[in-house]
Amino acid sequence: MKKLLFVVSLMAVSFSGSGIAMAAAEAGEGSVGAKAGIAIAAGLAIGLAAFGAALGQGRMAAAAMESIGRNPNAAPRIQLPMILGLAFIEALAIYALIIAFALQGKV
């Protein structure tokens, strides 16, 4: 539980810092610190999204394989919703990639 709290607080601090950097960049302050904050935010955006998508896809595939293993006759009814769910999870990672590219354009 302590590790989870530490990770969540670390993410909150990093996201708050990136927001300040983005605000400074839009205000016309082209400082190196603001650009570095935007670059870090872009890296964190795609990194965290890829990590979350990988965890979600792994858990979904494992659950689908376990349920197909328990009831092989239900495989066609499980496969289509699983593929749709995987596509939606991957779409979230692609949105994060688009956000990272948009942030990278501000550097």
Image (cartoon, rainbow, N blue to C red):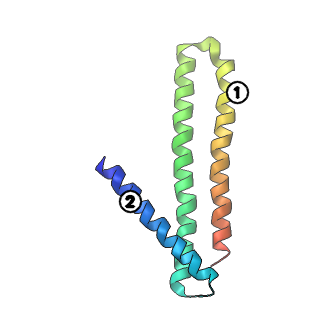
Quarter of the image for residue 72 reads top right
Which quadrant of the figure contains the C terminus? bottom right
Residue 96: x, y in percent?
63, 57
Q: Earlier in the sequence, mark 2 or mark 1?
A: 2
Q: Which label sits on residue 24? A: none
Q: Which label sits on residue 80? A: 1
Q: Residues within 10 Å of mark 2 (few under 14, many from 20)?
A: few
For this rendering, which residue is in front, 17 or 48? 17
State the SS at label 2: helix
State the SS at label 1: helix
Indicate whether 57 appears above or below 79. Answer: below
Q: Residues within 10 Å of mark 1 (few under 14, many from 20)?
A: few
Q: Residue at x 58, y 19 (%)?
A: 68
- Please state if 91 lies on the left or on the right of 69 as rendered: right
Residue 66: x, y in percent?
52, 22
Looking at the picture, which amino acid does disc 2 mark?
A: Ser
Looking at the picture, which amino acid does disc 1 mark?
A: Leu
Q: Residue at x 38, y 56 (%)?
A: 7
Indicate whether 84 appears above or below 4. Answer: above
In the picture of the structure, the residue carrying the numbered disc 2 is: 9
Quarter of the image for residue 105 reads bottom right
